[in-house]
Image (spheres, grey):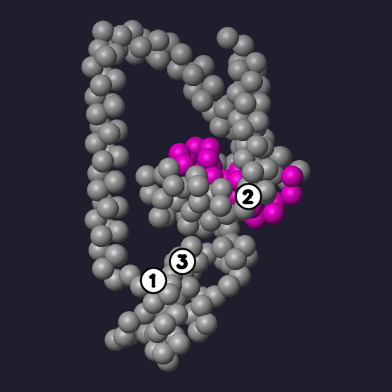
Amino acid sequence: MNGAVIVALATVAAMAADLIWFQVGRWQGFRVLALLCKISLEPDTCKRKTEQIFARHGLSSLLVVKFIPGLSTVAPPLAGITGAKFLPFFIFNLAGALIWVGTFVGLGAIFSDQLERIAGYLVPWAAAATAAIITLLLAYIAYQVRLRALLIRRLRMARVRADELREMMEAGVNPPGLDLRHPLDLESFPYVIPGAVLLPQSDIETRSHEIPEGQDVIAYCS
């Protein structure tokens, strides 16, 4: 097949999807990011990891995110959410799509003989190999789901509802609060529980001295 045609068609397809998600991010805000992260194996950290990478590298992160499963899905809507201009997004995303497509098309061209030879060896074992891969994938998903269920079970025992916190505050009991949201979350929803300290999760280790010791602390995020 013609390499230039392959690169062009694959890039157009990738750009079409990314431009749609970029516009959806502009229209729906962080709601679309929360929706996408719900189908992640790590829904509790998906949003935070993406925000940290995007906040650190900006639109230049679009050059490499397609090589990172998961981040490639949420990066375009996040660019729209953060108010990125269309033309810079288009340029960086186009460059990232070309790098991503070109890399794999190039690898396929360079190792075409070896790939055909390997494929020939695997044909008799295709059914068994497919079953093994699916089994390993399902086992990994089950492991991740169990870990999250155990974590949620532990956290539920130390949880306070919003109405309970309000009753405590009205009664004059004001436990120290930690707002663990990312700065990008604050831009879209700039409301803070009175008296809470803004402490993004990425800064907890370096600012641990700001967390009160020997007493209960109310921590919340998005």
Mark 3: few/some/many CA within 10 Å (<14, 14-19, 20+): few
- Work out whether 102 lies above or below 222: above
Name the residue located 56 percent from the left edge and 63 percent from the top edge: 185
Q: Is residue 134 left or right of residue 37?
A: left
Q: Which residues are magenta?
A: 65-86
Give x and y (percent) for residue 6.
60, 17
Q: What kind of residue is marked 2?
A: Gln
Q: Tell me the SS state at disc 3.
A: loop
Q: Is residue 114 left or right of residue 28?
A: left
Give x and y (percent) for residue 90.
71, 40
- For residue 95, say whether it is visible: no
Mark 2: few/some/many CA within 10 Å (<14, 14-19, 20+): few
First in sequence: mark 1 or mark 2?
Answer: 2
First in sequence: mark 3 or mark 1?
Answer: 1
Q: Which residue is mark 1?
A: 161
Overall secondary structure of the magenta section: helix
**Labelled disc at residue 221:** 3
Label 1 to label 2, Cα distance in Å?
A: 27 Å
Q: Which residue is mark 2?
A: 28
Label 2 to label 3, Cα distance in Å?
A: 20 Å
